[in-house]
Amino acid sequence: MKISGLVTAGFLAVAMAAGVPALAQQKPAPATPSAKATRPTEAPLRKFIADIAKGAPDYTTMAQGLADAVRGTPQAADRIKALGALKTLAYTETGPGGMDIYNATFEKGSLIFRIAMNAEGKIGGLLMQPAPAPAQ
């Protein structure tokens, strides 16, 4: 399933509203065999994706700016739901801006998520973008 630019724009707005610099220009690194999915951001990201899929985001787990941005971009949530169930979530690296980067594979497509927690333990920044097409 091809993901439209609306999804990227929607969550870029989410990330920017949460005070995260324009990270959309950064390209994710490929997953490495040594990357461990034991990051403190994994459980909050899994919960975020599950809550969005159920149509019930838990805004209490998000910084206020991020919660406001998620409320304002329902079309991005619709795109996540359209991908079906989450199959795998793999941490790849921590990007130069300090956000953890994950490759998420769903039944009908893939996305790249970048996530950062704030000092209160809430999701302070979140960016979602389409995953690159597989090499042919």
Image (cartoon, grey):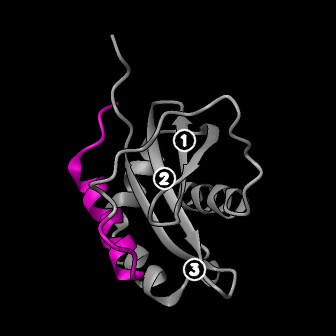
Secondary structure at numbered mark 2: strand
Q: Where the N terminus falls, by quadrant?
A: top left
Asked if residue 75 lies left or right of residue 101, the reply is left
Q: Find out whether the residues at labels 1 and 2 contact each other: C-beta distance under 8 Å.
A: yes
Q: Residue furthest left?
A: 5
Q: Which residue is mark 2?
A: 113
* Alpha-carbon span between mark 3 and mark 2: 15 Å
Location of residue 124 with respect to 26 vertically, above or below: below
Disc nearest the viewer among 3 and 2 = 2
Q: Earlier in the sequence, mark 1 or mark 2?
A: 1
Of helix, strand and loop, which one carries label 3? loop
Q: Which residues are magenta?
A: 1-22
Alpha-carbon span between mark 3 and mark 1: 20 Å
Q: Alpha-carbon distance for marks 1 and 2?
A: 7 Å
Residue where numbered disc 1 is placed = 104
Using the rendered view, name the quadrant where residue 48 is placed: bottom right
* Relative horizontal placement of residue 118, taking residue 112 as reference (left or right): right
For the C terminus, give its image quadrant.
top left
**Of the pair 101 and 2, the residue shown nearer to us:** 101
Q: Decide which of tag 3 and tag 2 comes sooner along the chain.
A: 3
- Name the spot of residue 66 as percent of width and height, x first: 46, 79
Q: Identify the residue at image location x=64%, y=78%.
A: 61
Amino acid residing under circle 3: Met
Farthest residue toward the right? 38
Magenta stretch containing residue 15, yes or no? yes
Three-letter code for the amino acid on which mark 1 is drawn = Ala
